[in-house]
Amino acid sequence: MNKLHDWPEPVIRVQSLSESGLKSIPERYIKPATDRPSLNVEEDPSNMDVNIPIIDLTGLSEDGNNLPQSTMDQISLACREWGFFQVVNHGVCPGFMDQVRETWRSFFHLPMEMKQVYANSPKTYEGYGSRLGIEKGAILDWSDYYYLHYLPLTLKDYNKWPAPPDSCREVIDEYGKELVKLGGRIMKVLSISLGLKEDRLQNAFGGDNFGACLRVNFYPKCPQPELALGLSSHSDPGGLTLLLTDHQVPGLQVRKDDKWITVKPAPHAFIVNIGDQIQ
């Protein structure tokens, strides 16, 4: 019988598989035919020019909401019709966003023995991982990841924060602060758009004692991308997700009107995802 802190079978790093030069992926990563990605855009050309809404947040700050009513209406409509939208002019420095992305890219390209120091377990999932769930024999996603608790402070474990590359911990901490601020501003806007007091949603999630976590997904090159998924279809269980994309790794799709729409990220935008709890 497995203990709580053990995986039910050996963990294989997808990055190691990718870099081994294999020509075909192991059976464990082959998705059922109904779940496989469609890589041929010609199958549905009507989706080629469709994108989730892009919304300019100029005027939204910690001190107050000075967004035009037209922008508030755009956010409300995006939440109702999509559950997703992109935000630009959101207050997070574009140069810092690039630094965050490159810091994590550097981590995943460290030697394996350095990354293994931060390997995670089913006990908390914090750290460097390569699988979701603990079911033996499950079909796996073609990705590695890193998961951290950021808030509340009682769950913050700096032993799981990677020290290499240089300044990684400082970058993670500053990034967390910036996104907590941005998330709080967006929560106020969502509350107002629902006709509620601006602090209603924030208070529903614990006020100043809410939870926040960070997950970084790494998608190594796949020799048979038509058979695999980097991340299986899912909804986010929390209240709000802010996603920083990598323009070198396209492929994020959202479901609308029974169709999968490939997201086209705007430069230095965050993608906002309304999670299960708010939905």
Image: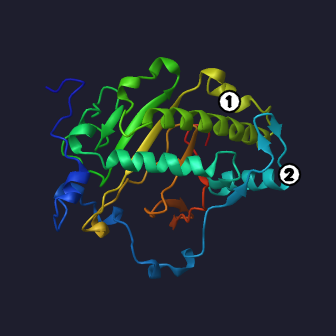
Q: Quadrant of residue 46?
A: bottom right
Q: Which residue in the protein does label 2 denote?
A: 68
Q: Which residue in the protein does label 1 denote?
A: 202
Q: Which residue is drawn at 61% across and 37% down?
A: 178
Q: In which quarter of the image is residue 130?
A: top left
Q: Which amino acid does label 1 sit on?
A: Gln
Q: Is residue 259 left or right of residue 70?
A: left
For the N terminus, which image quadrant? top left
Q: Which mark is residue 242?
A: none
**Regarding mark 2 in the picture, which secondary structure is present there?**
loop
Q: What residue type is labelled 2?
A: Pro
Foreground pick, 22 / 81:
22
Position above or below: 209 against 179: above
Relative image position of residue 169 (x, y in whole percent): 45, 33
Residue reaching furthest to the top: 154
Foreground pick, 116 / 232:
116
**Regarding mark 1 in the picture, which secondary structure is present there?**
helix
Residue 139 can be seen in this image: no
Rate crowding at label 2 as few (under 14), some (14 to 19) or many (20 or more) other CA atoms within 10 Å.
few
Q: Which is nearer the N-term, disc 1 or disc 2?
A: 2
Which one is in front in this view, the residue at disc 1 or the one at disc 2? 2
Relative image position of residue 185 (x, y in whole percent): 71, 38
Relative image position of residue 247 (x, y in whole percent): 49, 62
Q: Residue at x 42, y 44 (%)?
A: 216
